[in-house]
Amino acid sequence: MSDEIIQHTDAGTATDQSSGGVEEAKATAPNVTPFGRSDIISVFVGKQKVEFGIYKGILVAKSPFFEKWFGVGVKETNENVVNLLEDEPSAFEVVVEWVYANQVRAGKLTLTLVKAYVLAEKLCMPDLQNGIADSIRLRRRVPRPYHASGACRMLPEGCPLRDLLLDQFHFRFMKSPNTFKMGTADTDVEVAVELKEEIRKNPGLATALFWKTVDCSLKRDTGGPMDPRKFAGCNYHVHEDGKKCK
């Protein structure tokens, strides 16, 4: 309603017309979600090309990788299509859940989270990497030999998540060594056989556990390895530009 019309009516009429205009505007206003004006893109993941539909706007806001991808000079940009054929759908599912909910859902397999961590690094998403590390540190209290072995196999030395998974397993190993030793009253045959098999397939696991044991013996005042859950989460986080967590 314009000022001119209001000036040429009495107060009551102006009020009625004004309120009517507001109601009309409410009735005709489109119901737009926060991402309603953002294109939905298709991300094809893995050898089987599993398709994920996701809002471009929110994905670009969370990942510098996708921000660059949908910048300039990429042929597929015009089609709103991204191919991540070397990655696993289960890992990208973790990325999608983080993008929308900003959390790592409980119940994910540990090695799926390790793969998602590797993918998050590729997509330049350190917050997701740290969220995965926190989830594993706080929720997964009984690490298996194949978790530590998988960390050694998939993650480079010096990677915070690799350190976490090795620390978790080493803590369990040192607190109850007979669990992993055949022929004792406390032997857990399943995990003892599993450890032997993982060391056979991945000698790097034995080397990593050996040096962690040596480090503990040199720090006699510590009373042995600490439960990683008691450390500050920052110990296992990645930090941009070397900056520690706030």
Image (tube, rainbow, N blue to C red):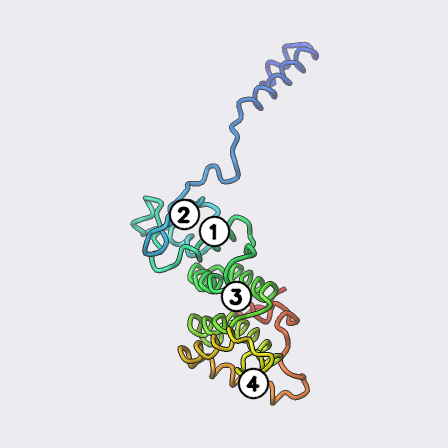
Is tag 3's residue or tag 2's residue first in the polypeptide sequence? 2
Alpha carbon distance from label 3 to label 2: 29 Å
Report the residue at 64% width, 18% height from top: 19
Alpha carbon distance from label 4 to label 1: 38 Å
Give the labeled residue for mark 1. 96
Q: Secondary structure at mark 3?
A: helix
What kind of residue is marked 1? Val
Q: Secondary structure at mark 4?
A: helix
Numbered mark located on residue 52 in the image: 2
The quarter of the picture where the N terminus appears is top right
Image location of residue 188, percent across then percent down:
55, 75
Image location of residue 211, percent across then percent down:
52, 85
Judged left or right of residue 75, residue 182 is right
Q: Tell me, yes or no, whether the two marked residues, 1 and 2, touch with CB atoms within 8 Å.
A: yes
Give the labeled residue for mark 4. 213
Alpha carbon distance from label 1 to label 3: 22 Å
Numbered mark located on residue 133 in the image: none
Comparing labels 4 and 3, the label whose residue is closer to the camera: 4
Judged left or right of residue 199, residue 175 is right
Image location of residue 128, percent across then percent down:
52, 59
What kind of residue is marked 3? Glu
